[in-house]
Image (tube, rainbow, N blue to C red):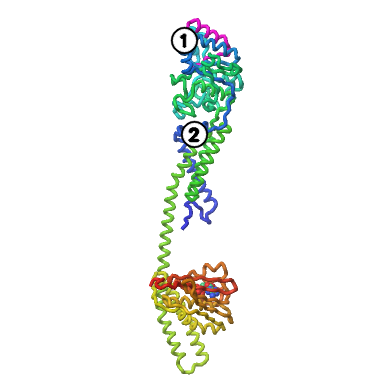
Amino acid sequence: MKLPSPFEETTNSSKPVQYRVYAIRAVLAMIMAFLIAQINLDYVESWLYDFRIRSQLFQRTSEKIELVYIKPSTVQAFKGQPNAKDQTAILYNLLAAHPRAVVYDFAIDDAQGSEEDKAEWANLIVQSTNVYVATPDTPLKGEERSLYLPLPFDHVRMVSAPKTSDTINFAKDRVTRRMLLSYQDSMMLPVTLAGFYNPDVLDFRKIRGYFDFYDTKQSFIDYRRPGSFPSTVFDDLANGKVDWTKFEDKIVIIGTDLNISESDYILTPYSRIPSAMTRIEMQANIIDTLIRNSSPVRMPTYVNWILLTLISILAIQIVLSMSPAMGLVILVGTLTGFSVISFTLFWLFGWWITMAAPLLAGFLVYYFFIPYRLIIENRRSWEYYQKNKLLSQVEELKTNFISMMSHDLKTPIARIQGMTDVILADQVQLSTQQREAVDTIKHSSDDLLKFISSILNYGKIQSEGVELHMQTKDINNVLQEVIRKHEFLAKVKRIQIVSELEPLFPIRMDPDLMRQVLSNLVENAIKYSPDDTKILVTSEERDERVVIQVSDQGPGIPEDELNNIFMKFFRSKNVKSTQIKGSGLGLYLAKYFTELHKGRIFVESKDGKGSTFTVELPMEQGGVNA
Ligand code: ADP
């Protein structure tokens, strides 16, 4: 039995009730959304954020940045890290290539060399306006002096270019996702450098997605895949294996990649291994993001709220109104759709929509409300079950009552029939009127008896009390008997019964029940056919079966009723209003009795063109349960 869903409105419920149900659901969804918003999902969100970055397929850089690495091979080539003299020589060559800027992003004061060499290098740095020395430190206002290096580098100006990792905020996984734009209003080096190509970024308000964070201004890094920026090994600069023209108009960042100090590396959305990316590649990513001004923008809180609430409302609506399987499909579809949209918006516009909370809302709401729905549905089906039980009890009571009544009626009717027979057999002359009266009594009591027998049989079927009394018999004999019995009825309507019976082997059957089946077919044929027509009764053997057919030239059976005529109490629309009497049980009993014999009964008929009823019985001995 299909149960209506718990919140489904019945047809007579008014619109306001419907709206109230929706309103309650919306409030529930908002409560759920509020509760989910309290859960810290930063870890999941950071994973989804990183995944969005990693899955960007088409990436381009500004092509304004060149990296120069001091690698272990450099140390081998120079028999130690390049000293001040080497550095000075390389810087001369680099400056001759007219780069837009040269940035040292390592501790230059660690370099070996004589004091004069160091002083020469320091002087060259100080005199060249486009050479910068980056430091990871960010001094407080008034403490800028702390950035100066010891002699002879003391007059080299250092500029802050720190890294910002998520150590105590957001995902707390030490991954670098943000960049520092300014600290206490002093601009960070990457902003200055990016400003050479895109002066807009020198005004913070024009930097995409910038936000205040304590005393800093920050924005997110629009990462390019590791290795996206061209790089040269320092020793290649020294041994002349390099085309210096490639540095023209570029920002050249010189740094180390020695796998010694963890502080030379950062963890990125691409990888969380400790040496995932060098500091100078991070600087390149930061500067590049600023040149392209393409920082990802975190969507305002209200947008995320609206999405979270919408998904919660949708999930509740789905869970409470749809079938569980369909609901799950639609819910998963919706959440997938939401994810696809979130990813696409990130890829195309750099919009960062919070995904973790809405996804969790979808699943939580589903698992929260499914049990609730199950409880309601269970209660309903229990109520249905109880109602059903009551109905079948009433039905049983009715059947029993009818059987009892019919049984008790049978005896007085038999007595009436007996008495009428006595009167008719008596030689005493009755007046015509009296004779007609006695005939009517006889026919009416015959009808009544037939009706009562049908009801009694029906009662037996209902209580599964029909028993087969098998005998081996020629069915042609039963047929002839039935035809003989109905000849009088046929004669009244001037109907001719033609029988074509093939000689048959005797078969096992319950003659009483088969008599009832065949009687019903012949009687119906007479009953429903007009006067002056023919009825053909045939019997033959076909494929190990005995086939009996009763055809008439009656009104036929409309196509839409063909499937129903074997149902209990079914009577055609056409006959209900006519004078033809019947209980609608005859064919139901015929079918039941035939099937008890492992046979089948069916009808072929065209409306207005007569009907042919066929009964097929199996021939083999013992083919039926005795
Ligand atoms: P009853 O004859 O008591 O109504 P049956 O179960 O014998 O019940 O028949 C069911 C219905 O099938 C009938 O009411 C009648 O509409 C239709 N029917 C049965 N036999 C014929 C027939 N030979 N010709 C036309 N209609 C028939």
Of badges 1 and 2, nearer the viewer stands 1
Vertical comparison of 120 with 198: above or below: above
- Residue occupying the point 41% across, 60% down: 386
Residue 167: x, y in percent? 44, 26
Which numbered disc, 1 or 2, marks the residue that appears first in the sequence?
A: 2
> How many discs mark residues in the rendered view?
2
Q: Secondary structure at mark 2?
A: helix
Does residue 315 appear left or right of residue 382 in this picture?
Answer: right
Q: Is residue 423 above or below residue 114?
A: below
Is 389 drawn above or below residue 86 in the view shown?
below
Q: Quadrant of residue 285?
A: top right
The answer as to whether callout 1 falls within 8 Å of ligand 1 is: no
User: Is residue 478 found inside the magenta-colored segment of the image?
Assistant: no
Task: Kindly tell me whether residue 32 is visible in this rendering.
Answer: yes
Q: Position of residue 5 (x, y in %)?
A: 48, 52
The span shown in magenta is 113-139
Specify the label residue 48 is tagged with.
2
The residue under label 1 is 112
